[in-house]
Image (cartoon, rainbow, N blue to C red):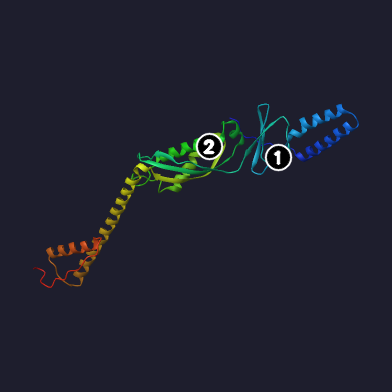
Amino acid sequence: MQNEKITTAPSGYLAFFLVLLLIAAAAVSFIWEQPIIGAVICIVNFVFILPGLTIVNPNESKVLTLFGKYQGTVKQDGFFWVNPFTVKKKVSLKAYNLNGQQLKVNDSVGNPIEIAAVIVWQIKDTAKAVFAVENYLQYVNIQSEAAVRHLANSFPYDHIEDENASITLRGGSEQVGLLLVQELNERLERAGIEVLEARISHLAYAPEIAHAMLQRQQASAIISARRLIVEGAVGMVEMALQKMEEKNIIELDEERKAAMVSNLLVVLCGDKAVNPIVNTGTLYH
């Protein structure tokens, strides 16, 4: 596999000045009626000097090949002169944004989900990007889609599906992003591409199960809320009985104590307001 080789090219200003001199010399030759000399000067100028002039813009590079052999890469920005017979391929070193399309895949427990990712990448090795793959832009798109699919298949959507999962797609966005960057760098290293950042931009259940999963989440939320309410109510009833015993407010037998506990739990755990009933008679009637 071809590795990048940085090359330093001479300044192009001297060559450009020479081009101007040769143009002037050719003009003088034609004026002095020396067409052969003028033609030779023009051939030398437009075949051997002028085609070698090249401009490298900031955050760009020129990959040079001579008769099918890699000569090096010019990464320094400026105006240069290189071998006029080399093929100069421009390769951008700027960061690219890939807004991946929404993919329909199954998570680790088999639920169909929709997922998409935003990936920031740039070329690190120009030689690999040009010579190791046919089209590095297409290569990035395909490998990114494969990495996102593999990531979605590796983790559950949420803890509802797998309570023992340490990482979920919905709850572990930071960890999932780091894992996605790691996998993408491994896949794209062949093309000399480095992934700077990757984030999940879209995550949802597939439409065919979205309504059922919403109901499941609502039911889970209700159960969790009820569990918390019951735990709090039991603690309050226990505290009430303990305070009454400490202050000798009233002595209750086991039957009446059970009735009181039942009434308090109904009041504390009910989801509607209760209407108090005043008992003016004896407790045992």
Disc sitting over residue 55 in the figure: 1
The quarter holding residue 22 reads top right
Q: Which secondary structure lies at badge 2?
A: helix
Indicate the amino acid at tag 1: Ile
Disc sitting over residue 228 in the figure: none
**Residue 24's spot in the image, x, y percent?**
85, 36
The quarter holding residue 194 reads top right
Residue position marked by numbered label 2 in the rendering? 140
Q: Which secondary structure lies at badge 1?
A: strand
Q: 10 Å neighbourhood of mark 1: few (<14), some, or many (≥20)?
A: some
Q: Residue at x 85, y 33 (%)?
A: 26
Counting residues from the N terminus, which is met first, the one under dot 1 or under dot 2? 1
Residue found farthest to the left: 285
Indicate the amino acid at tag 2: Val
The quarter holding residue 114 reads top left
For the C terminus, the quadrant is: bottom left
**Residue 253's spot in the image, x, y percent?**
12, 66
